[in-house]
Amino acid sequence: MAELEHKKELLQIIKTFNAAIISSRLYSFEHPQVKRYIEETFIELDRLLMIRQEISLIVVGNNLVFRNQTIQGNGPNVRQFINILQEKKIDHISFLANLPKSGLYALIQDISSSKTTELKSTEHIKLGKVEVRVEDNPFPQDQLSFEEYSEKMDQLLSLRDTTLQEIKEIYNSIKQSKKRIDVRGIENMVSTFIKGFAHGINPISMLASLKSADEYTFTHVINVCILTMSQAESLGFSGEKLFQIGVASVMHDAGKLFIPEEILNKPGTLTLEERAIIETHTTKGARYILGLEDIPQVAVLGALEHHIRYDGTGYPAMQKQWSPNIVSQMIAIADVFDAMRSRRSYKEPKSKEFIIKILQEDKGTAFNPFLVDNFIKLIKG
Ligand SMILES: [Fe+2]
Ligand SMILES: [Fe+2]
């Protein structure tokens, strides 16, 4: 089959359209980032509409169809676009020539709002509703057999163990020399991990379990990396951004290497003074990462902000109205989930159901509500 015409332009429209919806749900519709994404979507859409007059996209099962052809090489952006449409029960969307910019703004605002249940067609945007679910998918997804699934799982677990070993080496070399490490080592590790990462597999099945108390930091870091990457991927982050998020999650607790082990691994309750020392792992980690050459900026933020709550409280204390970076917010959820599910000498592990309940209760105060909903969807899988 010939390459789908205008595929590149379409994928670009889908990507910025998704980004507009996601950032509008995360921040607000007035946020400058939302405006930027809508403007970018509009420019691309308008350009393509001048050539085609009409752009119709239809959801058929798990596929997106354009001019009777599936958009092949789907990737997370197309999957996410389908999810966004299906959440609003739309299975067909057509954009017509001379689409006014205000029409696109209104559509994105309606789709991102949790209040809008009924979306209406307009003169330049036609929407088709899902009336009957497609039972027989004419484009079936590859179903893995039990053997194929087990083989894939084995590969993933061995990749996870190799990565765990590498994280251990990197963290140990930071600890021993307390001086700068070669960032390339972390980068190679993260990109290898991304390539083999578990697309579409419940991240919980990949988590490592703790073998001994002094291994806690490494086991925790790989688990936070798995849980953060899986959130990021489901939100449509890819390429360089996904890579940077991987680096940030691996480095988030680097500051713990500057905290005396007897405090870190102390069984039982910590004194106020010991607690205050542990809390400095955020600023110490950020300062250390800042001194590394060529490390993504977001890794500094991840280390600094992962214990700052959604409402700005937590530690380290920040100016009023401080809002942590979205990556730090994803790390914060992954961090709490792994800490609660791990067995330590002084506490029993908590069940998945219990942790979900806590995350739900702390939505809007400790955690970003949209990210919590997305995370729960992922781990329920
Ligand atoms: Fe931490
Ligand atoms: Fe942590």
Image (cartoon, grey):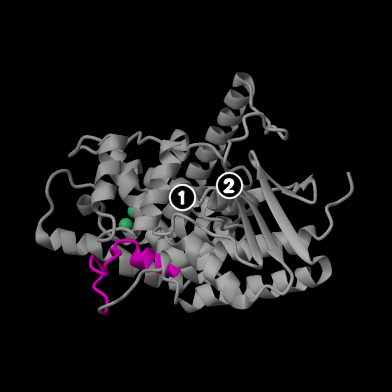
Q: CA distance from mark 1 to mark 2?
A: 10 Å
| Quadrant (top left/top right/bottom left/bottom right) for the N terminus | top right
Q: Residues within 10 Å of mark 1 (few under 14, many from 20)?
A: many
Q: Is residue 194 left or right of residue 348?
A: right
Q: Which mark is residue 225?
A: 1
Name which quarter of the figure residue 313 lies in.
bottom left
Q: Which mark is residue 342?
A: none
Tag 1–tag 2 contact (CB < 8 Å)? yes
Badge 1 or badge 2: first in the primary sequence: 2
> Can you give x and y, in whole percent of width and height, for residue 32 in the image?
49, 79
Report the span colored magenta. Answer: 300-319
In the image, 74 versus 179, the foreground residue is: 74
> Can you give x and y, in whole percent of width and height, for residue 121 in the image?
59, 61
Q: Is residue 153 above or below residue 129?
A: above
Q: Is residue 301 above or below residue 172?
A: below
Three-letter amino acid code of the residue under disc 2: Phe
> Can you give x and y, in whole percent of width and height, for residue 139 in the image?
72, 35
Name which quarter of the figure residue 331 lies in.
bottom left
